[in-house]
Image (cartoon, rainbow, N blue to C red):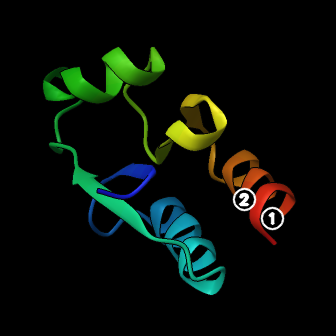
Amino acid sequence: MAEITMYELPGCPYCAKVRRKLDELDLEYDVIEVPRSHDERTEVKEVSGQTGVPVIVDEEHGVDGMAESDDIVAYLEETYA
């Protein structure tokens, strides 16, 4: 199991942006696809306090439920680049 988990919705351009950065940095990560309906996104809400995606969890660095693609990309660059 990877240390990084990404919650995403297929076809989401913001999720694709984060995925590209994870791949660019050659990081191992797990993906959890969330339901289309925000009402059904209970797991991502428990992790991040909201239902939007993308969201990442980075257990190795104590990041629980970071949202917003720009923030995630900046974090990944600072931490892993």
Q: Is residue 52 left or right of residue 31?
A: right
Q: Quadrant of residue 41?
A: top left
User: In the rendered image, which residue does mark 1 sit on?
Assistant: 77
Quadrant where the image shows the C terminus: bottom right
> Is 25 situated left or right of 47 in this image?
right
Percent coordinates x, y for residue 25 in the rendering? 66, 79
Name the amino acid, label 1: Glu
Q: Position of residue 77 (x, y in %)?
A: 81, 64
Quadrant of the snapshot with the N terminus: bottom left
Residue drawn where x is 26% and y is 65% of the image: 10
In the rendered structure, the answer to whether residue 59 lies left or right of residue 70 reads left
CA neighbours of label 1 inside 10 A, class few (<14), some (14 to 19), many (20+): few
Q: Is residue 34 above or below residue 29?
A: above
As shown in the figure, which amino acid type bears the numbered disc 2? Leu
Q: Which residue is identified by label 2?
A: 76
Residue 64 at x, y = what percent? 53, 27
Relative vertical location of residue 24 with respect to residue 50 in this rendering, above or below:
below
Helix, strand or loop under label 1: helix
In depth, the one of 27 and 18 nearer the eye is: 27
Residue 53 against residue 63 in the figure, above or below: below
Where in the figure is residue 69, as x and y percent of width and height?
A: 63, 52
Q: Nearer the viewer, residue 4 or 69?
A: 4
Q: Is residue 64 above or below residue 10?
A: above
| Side of 54 where 74 appears, left or right | right
- CB within 8 Å, label 2 to label 1: yes
Report the disc number at residue 17.
none
